[in-house]
Image: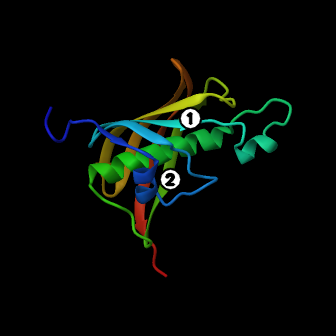
Amino acid sequence: MTETTTPITMDIHEILTRLPHRYPILLVDRVVELVKGERIRAIKNVSINEPFFLGHFPHRPVMPGVLILEAMAQAATLLALRSMDMVLDEKSVVYFAGIDGARFKRPVEPGDQLVLEVTLGRAKAGIYKFAAKALVGDQVAAEAELMCTMRRIEA
């Protein structure tokens, strides 16, 4: 394998240096495989201790779909940043620019391990397009096309 195709892994400590998110919205626990400019496979361990389970739903806890999309977007951000060997500073932020074709196929419950698989489709004019899937075991829980953009914050 060449340097650009050698899979990269990231533990929580490296993730925390690359993403600005913190508890309770940090939704990536580990990167098990990242190939620069191509794809990422990351993990979110879903615990009953997540604050959203208090209200969604008390009688049958289910991870909200918007948070599954957010987890996929965080994995996509890690892929884009690591592909460019970039670390965000306090004046940079990555935003959603679009979500297309979002489908939810299986509920995600406490105790599940959410596997986030994201592939970079294209990067043009500061817009990144990704194909993303979230799986539990071999079952697709959610999938979507995500578009993200990076912007400088002017204070």
- Mark 2 vs mark 1: which is more N-terminal? 2
Q: Residue at x 40, y 57 (%)?
A: 18
Give the secondary structure at mark 1.
Answer: strand
For this view, does 93 lie left or right of residue 34?
right
Residue 55 in view? no
Residue 133 in view? yes
Residue 139: x percent and y percent?
Answer: 55, 19
Q: Amino acid at mark 1?
A: Ala
Q: Amino acid at mark 2?
A: Phe
Q: Are marks 2 and 1 in contact (CB under 8 Å)?
A: no
Q: Quadrant of residue 32?
A: top left
Which residue reaches farthest top? 138
Q: Residue at x 50, y 53 (%)?
A: 96
**Disc 1 designates what residue?**
102
**Disc 2 designates what residue?**
96
Give the secondary structure at mark 2.
Answer: strand
Q: Nearer the viewer, residue 139 or 123?
A: 139
Q: Residue at x 81, y 29 (%)?
A: 60
Compared with 129, 81 (above or below) is below
Q: Residue at x 46, y 48 (%)?
A: 12
